[in-house]
């Protein structure tokens, strides 16, 4: 009995090769690097965050007035905690800022480089009209250069009931070696509105 093995072998190899080629074309690799993650599962997550008002910068948990920054176990989006900012006093300018620790951006020759920012935020009450998300780039000497994606305000959290999901992308400069995120309260002073608060959770920063 005769079997045409060489012919069957060639045919099978051709089919397998075609299937492998189609699979490789259909699923290109995506290179995404996690730069920072803040899930606020413990109070230690707030340790390196900073607060700013009227040109004064100090540790976030040191602020008692005109805003209070603390770990919140009662109002997390997920897990056991979140970051809570209570705006407890009206002020001359109304603007108060919460800043992340400096987030390192690795050097990379390929351009453009894209930063992906994701988080959940909730702003309730009347005094804080809105909170703006900003991201400032810095070079190797830690000197500020430009806003991420050359845009000052990347997203705005408005007063609402319930969590708002923020997901944005922006390009960084070739010289950028770190970025810092800022959540800036744009208040309305002198209106006699009630205390308001911002809650942040599940914040991640990635690069691709």
Image: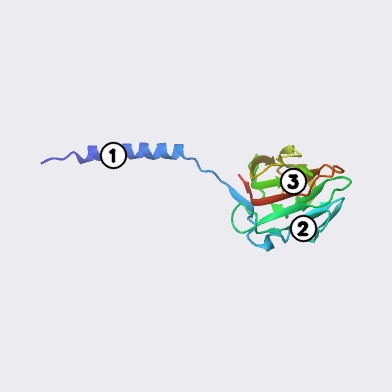
User: Could you tell me which residue is drawn at 74 percent across and 39 percent down?
Assistant: 153
Real-space CA distance between mark 3 and mark 1, rounded to the nearest whole angstrom:
68 Å
Mark nearest the camera among 2 and 1 is 2
Q: Is the residue 165 above or below the residue 51 in the image?
A: above
Callout 1 secondary element = helix
Real-space CA distance between mark 2 and mark 3, rounded to the nearest whole angstrom:
21 Å
Q: Is the residue 128 above or below the residue 102 in the image?
A: above
Relative placement, left or right, of 200 versus 95 is left
Q: Is the residue 203 above or below the residue 17 in the image?
A: below
Tell me the tag on residue 12: 1
Q: Which residue is mark 2?
A: 60
Please say if the residues under marks 2 and 3 sit with CB atoms less than 8 Å apart.
Answer: no
Rendered image quadrant of residue 149 = top right
Q: Is residue 178 visible?
A: no
Give coordinates of residue 79: x percent, y percent: 59, 57
Please say if the residues under marks 3 and 1 sit with CB atoms less than 8 Å apart.
Answer: no
User: Could you tell me which residue is drawn at 68 percent across and 40 percent down?
Assistant: 171
Give coordinates of residue 148: x percent, y percent: 72, 42
Give coordinates of residue 183: x percent, y percent: 74, 47
Real-space CA distance between mark 2 and mark 1, rounded to the nearest whole angstrom:
65 Å
Earlier-in-chain disc, 2 versus 3? 2
């Amino acid at each position: 009995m005769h079997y045409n093995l060489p012919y069957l072998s060639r045919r099978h190899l051709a089919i397998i090769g075609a299937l492998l080629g189609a699979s490789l074309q259909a699923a290109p690799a995506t290179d995404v690097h996690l730069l920072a993650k803040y899930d606020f599962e413990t109070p230690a997550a707030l340790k390196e965050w900073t607060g700013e008002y009227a040109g004064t910068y100090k540790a976030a948990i040191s602020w008692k007035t005109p805003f209070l920054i603390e770990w919140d176990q009662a109002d997390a989006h997920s897990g056991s905690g979140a970051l809570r900012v209570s705006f407890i006093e009206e002020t001359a300018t109304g603007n108060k800022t919460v800043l992340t620790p400096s987030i390192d951006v690795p050097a990379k020759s390929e351009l453009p480089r894209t930063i992906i920012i994701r988080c959940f935020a909730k702003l309730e009450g009347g005094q804080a009209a809105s909170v703006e998300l900003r991201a400032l780039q810095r070079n190797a000497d830690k000197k500020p250069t430009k806003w991420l994606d050359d845009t000052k305000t990347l997203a705005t959290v408005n007063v609402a009931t319930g969590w708002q999901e923020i997901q944005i992308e922006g390009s960084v400069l070739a010289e950028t070696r770190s970025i810092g995120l800022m959540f800036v309260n744009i208040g309305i002073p002198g209106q006699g509105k009630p205390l308001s608060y911002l809650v942040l959770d599940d914040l991640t920063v990635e690069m691709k």
